């Protein structure tokens, strides 16, 4: 039988039962019992784990880290993806042209999907806390996983929208009138929540395929928060700790980076059904015709030096009528997929973040080898140890672009962390200073006036 988990919007209610009429979103996950009702979900660790598994399934299905969310939306919002369809009402042209309005469909879906999963994470945290049937050690682990996932969602929301509501309860009367939390306070809370999760989680993965978060996953996310707050020394310690773990080894074969078995992977999301392709394998694919949706921008393609193996292996040229477009092809299998899951965190990000943190602390000599590790695998010459700080920071930003295009909105996050988003003005004619943030969805402002004022420019 299946556990039917219904997830409503932030202003709604979560239902955990076998039947429900009014719910808007349903996710199914395997459950070893025939039926389950709301009161029994957190009575034992088996059913609590099933509820947690449904949260992971929801991340893959619809969230800022699902393959068709941040990578696609933030890729075309910045300068990595060209969107080729203009006659559509899906909101994508507004994203691509930086002409967002607060009633935009993608803006609303990004916000809503994240808060749905946050609400669900909160329900798990509350349910486990009040449970009398779950052992304390299991409570600690389940809560830490839910806390890490909730933190990841809040992190993306803060990066995209700025000041955001930070609900930590399922209480409807509180959530429907919650005010925005200032960005600095959001980051303070993320530091506290992730520090708690790091202490509670173990290095050992619950599943050999690394589809559940572990301590090192939480450490990397906390390091990313530190990097955005310019706490470079704090980030350095966490990143070095990850690299010292025997769990991870650098993947030297460029053709195997996106295969699920790699020990360079910290965390990945499993497709909904066995044999399903990753979303990334499908949404960027086109062949023998001009693209009707997405292609890689000439700016991105041109950023790869001659001989870069990533260009040869992670993108493909499509030539039609004398015109050449490039598609992203990091994930290869569009059917009968047994080799690929959607990678959320991989070791290469640890290398480049550590290089950046060291460079920001003027430790150039120690930073350069981490950048060179990435470059050497790509078949590029190494950087000279005598490189200046400013030039090295630029090279690290360039390597991030070449390494992580179409992955989890990296380009937007990396430019923002380095206070370089305004360089998009040279590639995006409509780019303005206020585009560093998206508008809060109009629907949310109408439901809760305490979310005013709207972000500047909208």
Image (cartoon, rainbow, N blue to C red):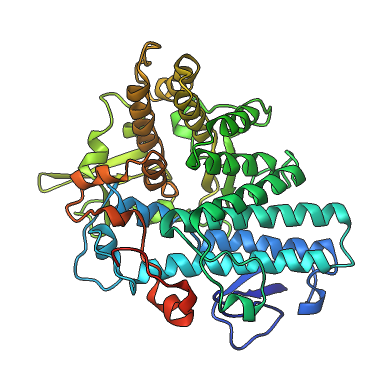
Image coords of residue 265 (percent x, y) = 57, 38
Judging depth in this view, the residue of 62 and 218 nearest the camera is: 218
Task: Look at the picture and state if 210 lies above or below 41.
Answer: above
Q: Residue at x 36, y 61 (%)?
A: 438
Query: Is 36 situated above or below 268?
Result: below
User: Where 199 falls versus 115 (above or below)?
Assistant: above
Q: Residue furthest bottom?
A: 21
Q: In this view, does 75 lie to the left or right of 188?
A: left
Q: In which quarter of the image is the C terminus?
A: bottom left
Q: Position of residue 390 (x, y in %)?
A: 34, 24
Q: Which of 211 and 229 is in front in this view?
A: 229
Residue 207 appears in the rendering: no
Is residue 113 visible from the viewing direction of this image?
Answer: yes
Q: Which residue is drawn at 81% across and 57% down?
A: 139
Image-based side of 369 in relation to 266, left or right: left
- Which percent across, then down, holds residue 47? 78, 66
**Residue 337, image x and y in percent?**
51, 50
Q: Quadrant of residue 387?
A: top left
**Horizontal side, residue 322 vs residue 206: left or right:** left
Q: Nearer the viewer, residue 114 or 405?
A: 114
Q: Residue at x 82, y 61 (%)?
A: 45
Quarter location, residue 122: bottom right
In the image, what residue occupies the spot 45% across and 20% down? 362
Label count reads 0
Of residues 232 and 124, the one nearer the viewer is 232
């Amino acid at each position: 039988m299946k556990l039917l988990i219904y997830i409503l919007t932030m202003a709604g209610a979560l239902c955990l039962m076998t039947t429900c009429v009014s719910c808007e979103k349903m996710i199914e996950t395997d459950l070893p019992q025939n039926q389950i009702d709301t009161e029994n979900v957190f009575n034992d660790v088996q059913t609590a784990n099933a509820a947690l598994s449904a949260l992971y399934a929801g991340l893959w299905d619809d969230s800022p880290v699902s393959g068709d969310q941040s990578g696609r939306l933030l890729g075309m919002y910045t300068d990595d993806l060209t969107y080729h369809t203009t006659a559509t009402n899906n909101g994508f042209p507004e994203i691509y042209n930086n002409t967002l309005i607060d009633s935009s469909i993608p803006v609303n879906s990004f916000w809503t999907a994240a808060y749905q999963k946050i609400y669900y994470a909160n329900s798990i945290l509350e349910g486990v806390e009040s449970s009398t049937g779950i052992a304390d050690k299991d409570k600690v682990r389940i809560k830490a996983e839910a806390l890490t996932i909730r933190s990841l969602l809040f992190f993306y929301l803060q990066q995209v929208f700025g000041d955001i509501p930070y609900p930590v309860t399922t209480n409807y009367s509180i959530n429907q009138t919650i005010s925005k939390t200032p960005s600095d306070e959001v980051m303070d809370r993320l530091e506290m929540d992730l520090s708690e999760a790091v202490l509670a989680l173990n290095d050992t993965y619950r599943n050999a395929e690394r589809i559940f978060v572990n301590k090192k996953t939480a450490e990397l996310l906390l390091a990313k928060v530190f990097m955005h707050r310019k706490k470079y020394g704090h980030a350095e310690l966490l990143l070095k700790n990850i690299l010292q773990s025997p769990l991870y080894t650098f993947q030297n074969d460029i053709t195997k980076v996106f295969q699920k078995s790699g020990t360079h992977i910290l965390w990945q999301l499993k497709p909904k059904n066995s044999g399903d392709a990753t979303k990334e394998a499908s949404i960027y694919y086109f062949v023998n015709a001009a693209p009707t949706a997405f292609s890689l921008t000439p700016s991105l393609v041109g950023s790869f030096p001659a001989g870069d193996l990533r260009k040869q292996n992670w993108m493909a040229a499509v030539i039609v009528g004398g015109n050449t477009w490039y598609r992203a092809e990091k994930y290869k299998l569009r059917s009968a997929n047994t080799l690929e899951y959607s990678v959320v965190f991989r070791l290469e990000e640890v290398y480049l973040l550590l290089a950046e943190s060291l460079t920001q602390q003027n430790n150039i000599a120690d930073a350069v080898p981490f950048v060179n590790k990435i470059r050497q695998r790509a078949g590029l010459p190494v950087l000279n140890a005598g490189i200046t700080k400013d030039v090295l920071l630029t090279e690290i930003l360039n390597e991030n672009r070449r390494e992580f295009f179409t992955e989890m909105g990296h380009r937007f996050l990396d430019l923002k962390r380095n206070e370089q988003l305004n360089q998009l003005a040279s590639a995006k004619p409509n780019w303005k200073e206020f585009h560093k943030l998206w508008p809060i969805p109009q629907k949310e402002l109408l439901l809760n006036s305490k979310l005013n004022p709207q972000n500047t420019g909208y």
